[in-house]
Every structure is written in structure tokens, then in C-alpha cells.
Image: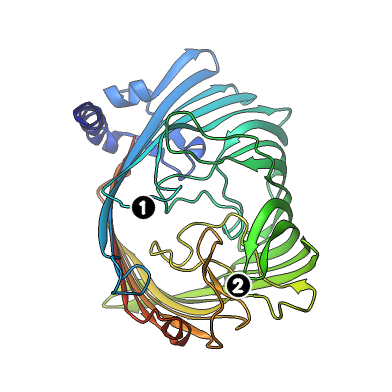
Amino acid sequence: MKKKLCIISFFFFLFVGAQESSYYNFSLLRQNDNINVLAEDSSIYETLKSVDIAKDITLSFGGGYRFQAEGFINQQFDSGDEQNELWYLNRILLHSHLKVDDTFELFAELNSSTEITKSNPSPVDVDKLSVNQLFARYRFSKKWNALLGRQNMRLGSGRLIDIREGPNVRLSFDMLQLQYEKEDLSITGFMAVPVQVQDNVFDNDYLRFRESVSSIYVTKRWNENTSTDIYSFYKREDQKTWNVGTADDERLSIGVRHFGTWKRFIYDNEFIYQLGKFGDLNIKAWTASFNIRHPVNLFKKRFFLGTKTELISGDKDQNDGSLNTFDGLYPRGAYFGRVAAFGPSNLFDIHPYLNAQLGKWSVELDYVAFWRFSVEDGIYGPPLSLDYPDTNDESFIGHQIGTVAGYSLNNNIALEVETNLIFPGGFLSESGLEDTLFHAVLTAEFKF
């Protein structure tokens, strides 16, 4: 532990003084970092961060450390059980990025995710040491490139494929990808297998074809204000469990997303239809999502007032020969805040929110009301596990009130506090889960 703190302190003092003289932006996916280090008067940090090996060959380094203190009261809406707990999560990511002209790149990233004092760690809490990303990309021309290896992905809004940044361990895929890009059009095709996380050193399962996904994803930019995504995903998963039972799940998801700005409104709307087979059942599922926000002036500051709503289908009848439960595939773990109480299946929600960027501060206040879309189906968690089976005919799940306050000292250092309260509605209360849930998480992160 002392050695880890010494390494972190070294990088902290190395880069904190370099911030003002550098032109670089860190991305969520670090292979997309925009680094343009000054050629003259560079600091020690800048000199080490990007090294010119030869003409048109550079090697850059980076990483980050994230600490989270997270706690729940009545985590499963029941004060009678021991559900009050506080734990600590640590994550270190270190990467190197080799670029040869604009033709070839090799990216490697190690992950170390650990927890302290959590009584029942989940698979996304602990991965002591693993290869998070390792891929090579070759560009045949300015428009065509191919990628082979392991990477994190976020496609579109992250509704179906996301990096899973909320939990401690990110989601990785072993994959083959082909991509076409020009100014107003992007087409991505891939075949991928999700990495199955284990909790020790370099022991993650790979190329376990009990679960796989392939996709064609097209983004068309119509003008500077309007874009459209059109895509299809084919996912196969052995022994998937829904409210109707457990069987092999094979489904095709076809979706369209339209997003951009109109006058002063910012919108992001999406519709997805799913079909396929779940055992002997025919899959017929869908979701529609609407998100619109508008700037408003409050206290002489610019805020954004918005509302989201999702309609996410659930199973209508266990005996009709069809499965209507929507599969969110690989969504972000914190779909409705980091409290992560409910996942994107069998839900209808109304979600107004207010947020703002006030200098180095960011603030957000939101409210969500949840209903079951179908009273014949249960409620699922973020990993799409059946957390609350169908036990009654009540529809309303509960109210959620959330707050987020963040502070960015500079590009490297950021702090954030999030709190959530969930008040159980009829469905949870009639299931014997009637106590208010409280959740809080403190996040401190620095990147270099």
C-alpha cells in the first residue's frame, strides 16, 4: 500500500505543475486523448509523456487513479436485514500508446481494481491485475482502418454498448473491427466477445463464446446541428435468465437514434426493436427514449433544464409463446445514477433534471419516477439480473431523488459527490420491501 501511495504522489507532483503550459485533453477512452505538447519550454511531465522515437514514430504514456467511498442504508429496501454498509474502491489504469505516422497504432492498458471492507464484492468490484485494453489498428487509407484485440467501447448514447464507467471494473471486448470514416459518415462493423472478469492476477477468461455480439453501426451527420445513428446488433447468450425462466437467448436489435439541436433545444431520441428466440419463445421487445433540454437563466447563471423518459418493454404474458422483455445488452452500470438500483428492462420512467457548469463546479439535481412497463414481469438490476421477481400486480416502483456536485481543479484532478434517495412504491412495498434506500458516493480522480 505504501509503494502504491508513493507512485501516486510522484505522478501527482509531476503533472500538477505542468497543467498551465500544456495543450491536451483526456478522454474517457484514453486511446482518444488529444495530446499536443509544446515543443519548447516543456516540463518534465510533458517530456516523459510523449517521446519521439524516430521520424513519425511517437510513444506516449498515461493513466489515472480513482478512489471511491460508497455507502448504502437499506440497500435492498429492508431495514430488517444487515444492509447498511460503507466500502472503498480503488482503480489504477496505466497505458502506453505507440503511433507510427497515421498508419499504425498499438495501444496497451493495464487495470488494477480493488475494494476494501465490502462484505460481498460483485464481479465488477475487483480485478486485481488485468489487461484492460490491448489492440492494434492499421489504417489502409484515410477512410478505412481495421482493429484487432481487446478494447473498451461506447457506441452512440451508450444505451446498448458502453464502457461501464460507473462500476470499478470496466467492460472489455476481444474483437475484430473494420471501420470506414469520412467527414459526414462513419460505418463500424465488428464481431466481439465480452471478457469474463475474475478477481485475481491475469486470470480473466477470454474468447468464451457462450456470449458474443456483432454489429453494424452507421452514423450520418446531416449538418452541424443534426445527426442520425442507424444500427443493428446480434447477440447470443447461453442460459440467460428472465422472469419466464432460463434458456439460450439469441436476439437481433435494430435501432435508430436522432440527435442534435433545434433552435435552443438539445435533443437525443432513440428507438430500438428486438426480435429473435429465447428457448422456444419468440422475442418481440422494444424501447423508446426521449431526452430534451433547454438552457435557462437562474441566479444570473446558465443552467440546463431537461427531461428524459424511457419506455422499455416487459413480458406481457408468460403463456403466449412470446418474450417481450427488452435486453439492454451491455449498458452503462449507472443507468439511473450510480445508485444503480434498476436496469433497462420492463420500465417506464419520467426523469426531469437540472444541471449546470459553474466555472470549475458542476451541479445536477434530478428526480425519477419508475413504473413497471408490464405487471406480468419483474424488475431487473443493471447487469440485467432478475433482482425483484413478479410477486404482485402493483405497477409503481418508487421515487428517486438524486444530487451530484463536482469540482475540477484542472484537467488532471476532479472530485465528485453523489447522493440518492429512493422511496419505495406499491410494487416494492407489496413485496415486503418498504424502507427508504439511501446511497452516497465520493469520487476522487486524477489522470496523467
> Which quarter of the rendering shows the N terminus?
top left
Q: Which residue is mark 2?
A: 289
Farthest residue to the top: give it.
54
Q: Which secondary structure, mark 2?
A: strand
**Amino acid type of disc 1?**
Asn
Q: Would you place residue 229 above or below residue 149 in this image? A: below
The answer to whether 331 appears left or right of 356 in the picture is right
Task: Give residue 245's position: percent from left, percent from top.
Answer: 66, 66
Residue, x 71% and y 77% (percent of image)? 318
| Foreground pick, 45 / 116 | 116
Task: Give residue 187's position: percent from left, percent from top.
Answer: 73, 47
**Amino acid type of disc 2?**
Ser
Q: Would you place residue 70 above or below residue 179 in this image? A: below
The answer to whether 324 appears left or right of 341 in the picture is right
Q: Which residue is mark 1?
A: 120
Label 2 to label 1: alpha-carbon separation: 34 Å
